[in-house]
Image (cartoon, helix red, strand yellow):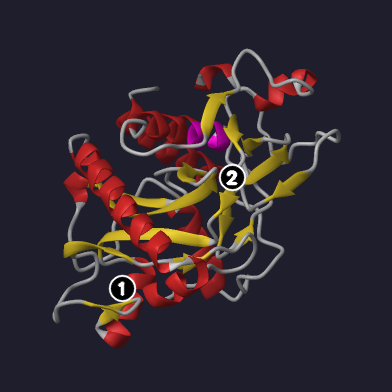
Amino acid sequence: MLSNEPETVVKTHISSFPVRRGKVRDVYDLGSEILLVATDRISAYDVVLPTPIPQKGVMLTVISAFWFRHFAGIVPHHLIDVVDERAPRGFQDQLPQLRGRAMRCKKTKVVPIECVVRGYLAGSGWTDYQRTGAVCGVELPKGLRQCDKLPNSIFTPATKADEGHDENIPFDQAAEQVGRSCMNMLRERSIKLYESAADYAAKRGIILADTKFEWGELDGEYLLIDEVLTPDSSRFWPADEYEPGRDQDSFDKQYVRNYLTTLVEAGKWNKTPPGPELPADVVANTAAKYAEAVKRLTGQA
């Protein structure tokens, strides 16, 4: 599928249907369905950068579609099919820019909570732990190091934000927002999926440190939606290089973050729009990391 998609797509333009644009995805409303288009946009510090990563959207779609099918016997999901040789009605002329990067999906009522599951102490969880000894209110043992494996997987919900920062919130606050029975069920499902995926990834030399799931309700049933276990929504670390007590190498935006950090430290960028252009080597190295994640997880080159 990857070799059939030569175009770099930063933004789709299909005037016949309402569209909502996120940081990476353009979502077209088809009535009872949606068309979820993963572009090649990349964001960091919640700013969409002007330089795309070629075929990034294709690679994200390959990975998400793989996981939707992998989990089909465990939880229901919203994926109908991936646009490849045929486009949905009304999109035929757009097939070259949609091929391999667009998913036709059932339309659901989105649960406005990011369902984050953590198996390792990293990112904002590590920052929270250093300050409070807990992560989003979940108490943890003393003396843990950065990127240590946690005694048990923990569920740390967050608010959803199309723009700006997602915000970690306590479980009780999430339950007040969408209902305790709903959150109890989504917590159980999310942890089950995370642990299943972590076991799968470990056999392929990858540590799944944490991830976020999204859910939507349709006819009284909760479906797994959006993207699933991609480098944009998860921390994937190479197992053979894992060493707690420091940041880990990862299959995601590492090269982008490292480059932007040099600009921030030099006072050349302040983490606000507009973002800076990315050099060619940063783009190439980032694309290579995504491609390696695709190959390891799905077997596709």
User: At which x and y percent is residue 115?
Assistant: 41, 59
Q: Residues within 10 Å of mark 1 (few under 14, many from 20)?
A: many
Residue 73 vs residue 263, the one in the foreground: 73
Residue for point 50% across, 66% down: 178
Cα separation, mark 2 vs mark 1, equals 33 Å
First in sequence, mark 2 or 1: give its number.
2
**Residue wearing tag 2:** 108
Residue depth check, mark 2 versus mark 1: number of the one nearer the observer: 2
Structural crowding at the residue carrying mark 2, measured as other residues with C-alpha within 10 Å and reported as few (<14), some (14–19) or many (≥20): many
In this view, which residue lies farthest toward the top? 85
**Numbered label attached to residue 290:** none
Q: Secondary structure at mark 1?
A: helix
Q: Is residue 296 magenta?
A: no
Q: Position of residue 81 (x, y in %)?
A: 54, 24
Q: Secondary structure at mark 2?
A: loop
Position of residue 75 in the picture relative to residue 176 (left or right): left
Write the residue at 39% across / 28% down.
69
Q: Is residue 237 visible?
A: no
Q: Where is 151 relative to 110, above or below?
A: below
In the rendered view, does 164 fall on the left or right side of 210? right
Q: Looking at numbered disc 2 in the image, what kind of residue is underneath it?
A: Thr
The location of residue 65, given as percent across then percent down, is: 46, 31
Residue 11 located left or right of residue 146: right
- The amino acid at mark 1 is Trp
Query: Which residue is labeled 1 in the image?
Result: 126
Q: Main secondary structure of the magenta part?
A: helix
Q: Which residues are magenta?
A: 56-61
Residue 60 part of the magenta segment: yes
View extreme (front): residue:
220
Q: Could you tell me which quadrant the C terminus lies in? A: top left
Please identify the quarter of the rendering in which residue 100 is found: top right
